[in-house]
Image (cartoon, rainbow, N blue to C red):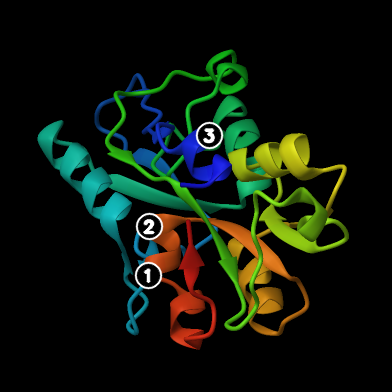
Amino acid sequence: MSHLSVGITTVLTSLLFAVPAHPDTPLRLAVVDVPFEPFEYRLPDGTLTGFEVELGEEACRRIERECEWVEQGWDGIIPGLLARKYDAIMSSMAITDARREQVLFSEPYYSNPSVWVTLTGQEIDIEDHEALEGLSVGVQRGTIRDEYITDTYGDLVDVRRYATDEDLAVDARAGHIDDITHSRCRHSKSMLKAAESLPARR
């Protein structure tokens, strides 16, 4: 197993939950960077669905509230909560000490290790630092993968940061970057898999 997998395999994602004062009003739940399959995406008829959307709808049902879904970019997800644009974040987020200082987390509800994703036929040993030197590695800005790659490989590789997961996927499929780091769950159900040219390597 690679150093990347070891470093973040045990990082779990959580729901941030804060119930507003008026039970008759909808519970405003934020989701990040739609589409983000299999967690949140839209059906052909425009209906918002996905694992976390269904989980949020079930939470609302149990507390007898209506759900109101708010789409938010990753960079603004915590600032939006602090500004009370919504009542809770219902999107995958790793628990870190820095985030704990700003928000409250629920109990973790799934584990999501990260993988390296490369173009077919490109052999890269991530433990061979000499082989990595000068390569470009794509990450989504502000994620734990951004932090890990920057801290661990930042002096060796060209770290390229993307605002959204989709922007990262587009450049990866086009071959504009040598590697990306991605969540295993997201990679297995995403545009990356559809390209059939970006196998996950752990």
* Residue holding disc 1: 189
* Residue holding disc 2: 185
Label 1 with label 2: CB-CB less than 8 Å:
yes
Q: CA distance from mark 1 to mark 3?
A: 23 Å
Residue 160 visible in the current orientation:
no
Query: Callout 2: helix, strand or loop?
Result: helix
Q: Nearer the viewer, mark 1 or mark 3?
A: 3
Q: CA distance from mark 2 to mark 3?
A: 17 Å
Which residue is at a point 81% across and 63% down the rendered structure image?
A: 135
Horizontal placement of 156 versus 99: left or right?
right
Q: CA distance from mark 1 to mark 2?
A: 7 Å
* Residue holding disc 3: 7
Label 1 with label 3: CB-CB less than 8 Å:
no
Label 1 sits on what residue type?
Lys
Give the numbered dot on residue 89: none
| Image coords of residue 110 (percent x, y) | 29, 40
| Image coords of residue 155 (percent x, y) | 87, 42
111 and 44: which is toward the camera? 111
The numbered mark, 1 or 3, whose residue comes first in the sequence reads 3
The numbered mark, 2 or 3, whose residue comes first in the sequence reads 3
Q: Vertically, is 165 above or below 113?
A: below
Q: Vertically, is 38 above or below 11?
A: below
Label 3 sits on what residue type?
Gly
Label 2 sits on what residue type?
Cys
14 and 199: which is toward the camera? 199
Horizontal placement of 42 versus 131: left or right?
left
Label 2 with label 3: CB-CB less than 8 Å:
no
Q: Nearer the viewer, mark 2 or mark 3?
A: 3
56 and 171: which is toward the camera? 171
